[in-house]
Image (cartoon, grey):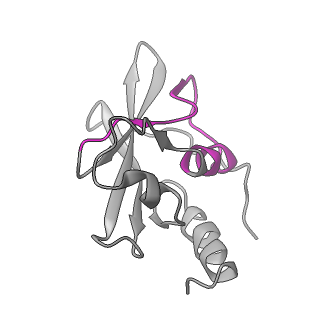
């Protein structure tokens, strides 16, 4: 059973000011797109950033918060990512409309959630 209320105690282990929260792969994309979501800390707040190969400005909701996200909040962030169509590169809008294969060292059930969703939509 997936615990949607799971929240890691921290994103950081003392090795640096930012950390990889999750990596998203989109195998149906022509180029096998990947997006990585990072957390950075500044003045006690977590700031989130999504990075792809093309350097698109990917909008995240929330952009920042004062504690680590719950699994449910992270899923919402992933499922609502978007870009400005005027500046989008590499067909990112189509990629974001897909269902990713997710990996995360911090959120153990993230992979299972998206695997089940892909299975439901016949992608597995």
Q: Residue at x 58, y 43 (%)?
A: 77
Q: Is residue 109 above or below residue 56?
A: below
| Residue 69 seen from this side | yes
Whether residue 28 sits left or right of residue 6 in the image: it is left
Which of the pair 118/82 is nearer the observer?
Answer: 82
Q: Is residue 114 above or below residue 63?
A: below
Residue 116's x, y, as percent? 65, 76
Whether residue 91 sits left or right of residue 1 in the image: it is left
Query: Residue at the front extreme?
Result: 86
Q: Quadrant of residue 70?
A: top right
Residue 94's x, y, as percent? 45, 59
61 drawn magenta: yes
Q: Residue at x 31, y 41 (%)?
A: 56
Whether residue 42 sits left or right of residue 9 in the image: it is left
Which of the pair 53/69 is nearer the observer?
Answer: 53
Quadrant holding the C terminus: bottom right
Q: Is residue 45 above or below residue 10?
A: above
Count of numbered circles on the image: 0
Whether residue 114 sits left or right of residue 60 in the image: it is right
Q: Quadrant of residue 1?
A: bottom right
| Residue 105 seen from this side | no
Residue segment shown in magenta = 55-78
Which of the pair 16/79 is nearer the observer?
Answer: 79
Q: Residue at x 73, y 48 (%)?
A: 5
Q: Residue at x 54, y 50 (%)?
A: 78
Residue 81's x, y, as percent? 52, 44
Q: Is residue 70 above or below residue 84?
A: below
Residue 7's x, y, as percent? 63, 45
57 drawn magenta: yes
């Amino acid at each position: 059973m997936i615990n949607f209320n799971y929240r890691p105690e921290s994103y950081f282990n003392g090795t640096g000011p930012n950390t990889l929260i999750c990596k998203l792969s989109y195998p149906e994309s022509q180029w096998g797109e990947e997006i990585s979501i990072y957390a950075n800390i500044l003045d006690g707040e977590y700031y989130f950033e999504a990075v792809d190969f093309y350097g698109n400005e990917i909008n995240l909701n929330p952009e920042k918060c004062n504690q680590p996200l719950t699994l449910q909040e992270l899923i919402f962030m992933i499922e609502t990512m978007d870009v400005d169509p005027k500046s989008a590169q590499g067909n990112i809008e189509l990629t974001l409309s897909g269902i990713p294969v997710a990996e995360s060292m911090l959120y153990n059930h993230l992979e299972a959630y998206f695997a089940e969703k892909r299975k439901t939509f016949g992608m597995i």
